[in-house]
Amino acid sequence: MSELVYEGKGVIVHIKGPVVEAEGMRGAKIREVVYVGEERLIGEIVRIEGDKAIIQVYEPTGGVKAGEPVERTGEPLSAELGPGLLGQVLDGLGRPLEVIAEKAGGPFITRGIKAPTLPRDKKWQWTPLVKPGDDVVAGDVLGTVPEGSVTHKIMLPPTIEKARVIEVLPEGDYTIEEPVVVVEHIGGKEEVKMYHKWPVRTPRPFREKLAPVELLVTGQRVIDTFFPIVKGGTSAVPGGFGTGKTVTLHQISKWADADVVVYVGCGERGNEMTDLLHTFPKLVDPKSGRPLLERSVLIANTSNMPVPAREASIFMGITYAEYYRDMGLHVVLTADSTSRWAEALRELSSRLEEIPSERGYPAYLPDYIASFYERAGRIKVQGRRDELGSVAVIGAVSPSGGDLNEPVTQHTMRYVGAFWALDKDLAFKRHFPSINWLRSFSKYTGGLKEWWIKNTGHDMMAYRDKAMALLQRASSLEEVARVVGEAALSDENRLVLLSAELIKEGFLVQNAYHEVDTYCSPKKQALLLKTLLEFYDRARPMIDAGVPVSRIAEMRSLGLLRRLKFVPEEEFENAVKEAIAQLEAEISSLLAEVR
Amino acid sequence: MSVYGLTYKGIDQVKGPLVIMRGVPGAAYEEVVRIYSEDGREWFGQVLEAGRDKVVIQVLGDTEGLDSNAMVKFTGSTLKIPVSDEMLGRVFNGAGEPIDGGPKIRADDYRDINGAPINPAKRDYPDEFIETGISAIDGMLSLVRGQKLPIFSESGLPHNEVAAQVARQAVVPGKAERFSIVFAAVGLKYDDVLFFRRQFEEFGALSRSVLFLNLANDPVIERITTPRVALTAAEYLAFDLGMDVLVIITDMTNYCEALRELSSAREEVPSRKGYPGYMYSDLASIYERAGRIIGRSGSITFMPILTMPGGDLTHPIPDLTGYITEGQIFLDLDLHNRGIYPPINVLPSLSRLMKDGIGPGKTREDHKEVSDQLYAAYSQGTKARELVQIVGEAGLSPREKLYLEFARRFEREFVAQGFRERRSIEETLDIAWDILSILPEAELTRISEKTLNKFHPKRRIAAQAEGE
Ligand SMILES: Nc1ncnc2c1ncn2[C@@H]1O[C@H](COP(=O)(O)OP(=O)(O)OP(=O)(O)O)[C@@H](O)[C@H]1O
Ligand SMILES: Nc1ncnc2c1ncn2[C@@H]1O[C@H](COP(=O)(O)OP(=O)(O)OP(=O)(O)O)[C@@H](O)[C@H]1O
Ligand SMILES: [Mg+2]
Ligand SMILES: [Mg+2]
């Protein structure tokens, strides 16, 4: 946040919660950041009427009085982008929570604290990649520094279209405030530091958007196999309370094969952030071998923190994500929960006395949701290099009463490529992830057939279709069974139910807290599903031969199949062979019995 | 230009609980005001809108008798209460004033009743098991120190008994110290308050408890402050004095209704069922005060009670609460009618912090798997029971019959227990195994081979036989 203060202060004339009105603000711009009152609380101008500005204040306004000053900064709300983001825990305005605690002198958050996002005293190991005389354009890599688990590229910021390098600092350790490169352009000389600022509500530029085609492996079976998301794709996770949204997002943040993860805790529980802070340093990123925290940026604006900052936190997060994308990295952003973000918007809108639309949300809600999901994508980066980067966006949605028929869910549904509808009934049964396979969708499955064949040797999308058909058949049979009882169904139909049950228990149910089950590689997923599908094919002839389904249900091998998922990757192929052998043996003996 | 300390004579308008004044340019947002009528009556209020031209004050208490000649004094401060260890053993009203006839308490400090958000980076993760002695809770909804776990109930159900039983029995295994209790009644009948008082007295907890009472006939507006005042006291006991505090607030439904009343007096656009759109954030500012803090030894474990209007889980009050708390204990009318105490329906219940509070070294290594299996099996059992309504017991398959029997025994032997019965976690898990063992082993898919070998009663008997 800039400390540059414009001449001519405004004066507060009215305070009502987080909305403050000030006079004497002529020349101020919409979205400009201002400091409000004696305590210099951070605010943003949301409306201008003549020389009056309406300000949304990001900190509690208790004790603020009419007559106190408002200072202008001349800058929009911006993110600091540079080395030092990874491993940080920030509030919705990009202030490190550790620094806030230090300055507040205690565990409670106080007001008016100014804390820059990036550490100013830390030195980074700079390796220049340009020399004086080189011509560079926006996005070109000027040099690199190692940061956490990535090689952080220092690029010519998008604000400098093209320039000529005139000075470069030699390899060495520097802070982000030292100008590592000096360039010259039409406007004159300009120092380039390792960081720059970017207005969070403006998408960062890129050369070209491409269709996303590569599976984002999450290690969660029902997601990767049934409702996959791709690198650069979008997904929403709607569900009532306790259905598993947060666990799903945590799992993806832990296991997704991404280079960088941005986790935005927006209006949710404090302890959920603490949970991440406890587990991330202990978990190791298989790619880099370093603690997961070093590939992550955590944003925590919990439900009891000021509501307006919730609104900002999502834009802050997506700007960080785009920045790492611009380095040619694959980024995943998860946001929990976009509903709390939309509610913050509703609250502001109602305080501004705008005309409410559906359920009190402003009429621009759809555009607003779109403006967030539209920032996802797989792109060709700026600058003269052939690199691709991506941002995948996954947002939790918390519909009131668990009813998906409400504005935030409905509008979100229009903009996302995958939709994981969580189901309260499944959650009550402890069928987790409680993704309802009849109401969820993914538009990405079509493009992934090749990916699975290439990476696992299995035509997984064919297995998927087969499993889906079985589940659907079972679901209509269950309808019937609910009326007449399972006992009244034919043995053939009861075998369908049994086989579908096996897919559910043995494949779809995945325990996030089980040492082995928490992550399942694509290879294991493919072999597991193939094996479980074989059960029906092998058992089917027994029914024709007259083996009662109750005997089939008692087979010991069925228990083995149900628990195959708990077998670690290294022992998995053998375990499959054993289970199949056992199954074959039991089938022959049952067949022998009826003959 | 501050009006701090200034007293103004005359108000422009009284509208429900709102007082509007003009020409008080320096009033501070949220500052507390005192209003005196000519006949010597006194009100408390808080600035809701601070403008150069207009100030809106929300008055605590009934505004009847307020007229345009009243005097308004601006105090320059937000709503604060005195705190010290002298709060223990005392009874206060919803504004934090003693009502037990005793003296004012010594003030070691004055604290803003709204508190301040705990910095998420300074929270300590709650992961210590609290043994409540109630099987359904300990076995399947384990409570941990610093958790916020509400009871979702309906009028007529024994939520008070369940909360009192928890308060009486709760211990952190290995810790000598008992919980201090902060109890807040929000819009409660005197009978209910008396019940809790007797309970606390009976198990000798009165001297380590603090009571805040807003009764059904007390000012509705004070229902807004009661939970905040109670939590301010709890924070002091926990984070300044290092005590483990159990906070029980009942009935949060009355709180939410007061919030709705206030919101409609302010003519705000309502959200679902007339409750204000900010109710989620408002409730969060209360519930999120529970927890533990790095470097401080105390904790706030929070058990609010709410009655679901019409028993409807999707009603905004339970709905928004469930979105904030770390699970819920759901009391079920049907179980109650069948004579099951405590009538906890575990299926819609949840403890989100259970995973890190149980297991080897904390409870027992089989705890998690047993709990998962109980859930899965009980849900099969309830499904079978629904089916009985339609096709009769004869129409069930043998497997369904087995699950039906399982559900019956689960409710009667595991869930049901006495109001004064305290079961250790070992006893709880042993009962669970006893009931689970009526199912074929192939059905126990949530339990690993290893755990089956060690804990399944049949395998244990087999292993013993082999040994002999
Ligand atoms: N994959 C999973 N494996 C095991 N348990 C799970 C899984 N997903 C969810 N759960 C269980 O469900 C509980 C609730 O999940 P979670 O906190 O993610 O819900 P939520 O949808 O985010 O709810 P809210 O909207 O209230 O935040 C968890 O505490 C955990 O017990
Ligand atoms: N500010 C608000 N915050 C939350 N909910 C609101 C708000 N304003 C209105 N609602 C609720 O949204 C629902 C619909 O409101 P409204 O009538 O404005 O929208 P609508 O699309 O015309 O719906 P309906 O067809 O039900 O009239 C109602 O339950 C209303 O109480
Ligand atoms: Mg959640
Ligand atoms: Mg309407």
Image (cartoon, helix red, strand yellow):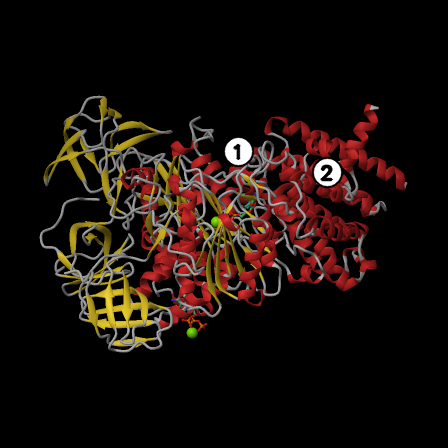
The residue that label 1 is drawn on is A455
Picture quadrant where residue B76 is located: bottom left
Q: State the image coordinates of residue B402 (x, y, percent, origin top left).
A: 79, 49
Is residue A571 visible to us here?
Answer: yes
Which of these two is toward me, B454 or B296? B296
Which tag is nearer the camera, tag 1 or tag 2? 2
Judge the density around disc 2: few (<14), some (14-19), many (≥20) Cα neighbours within 10 Å: some
The secondary structure type at the circle numbered 2 is helix
* Amino acid, disc 2: Gly
Residue B386 appears left or right of B216:
right
Give the amino acid type for the residue marked by disc 1 in the picture: Asn
Quadrant of the drawing holding the N terminus of chain B: bottom left
Chain letter belonging to callout 2? A
Q: Is residue B343 above or below residue A288?
A: below
**Which mark, by number, is residue A181?**
none
Query: In this picture, is A204 found above or below A291?
Result: below
Mark 1 neighbour density, 10 Å: few (under 14) some (14–19) many (20 or more): few
Assess mark 1: CB under 8 A from ligand 1?
Answer: no
Q: Residue B252: give x, y in percent of width and height.
A: 49, 61
- Image coordinates of residue A353 in percent, x first then y, are 30, 68
Q: Residue at x 62, y 62 (%)?
A: B157
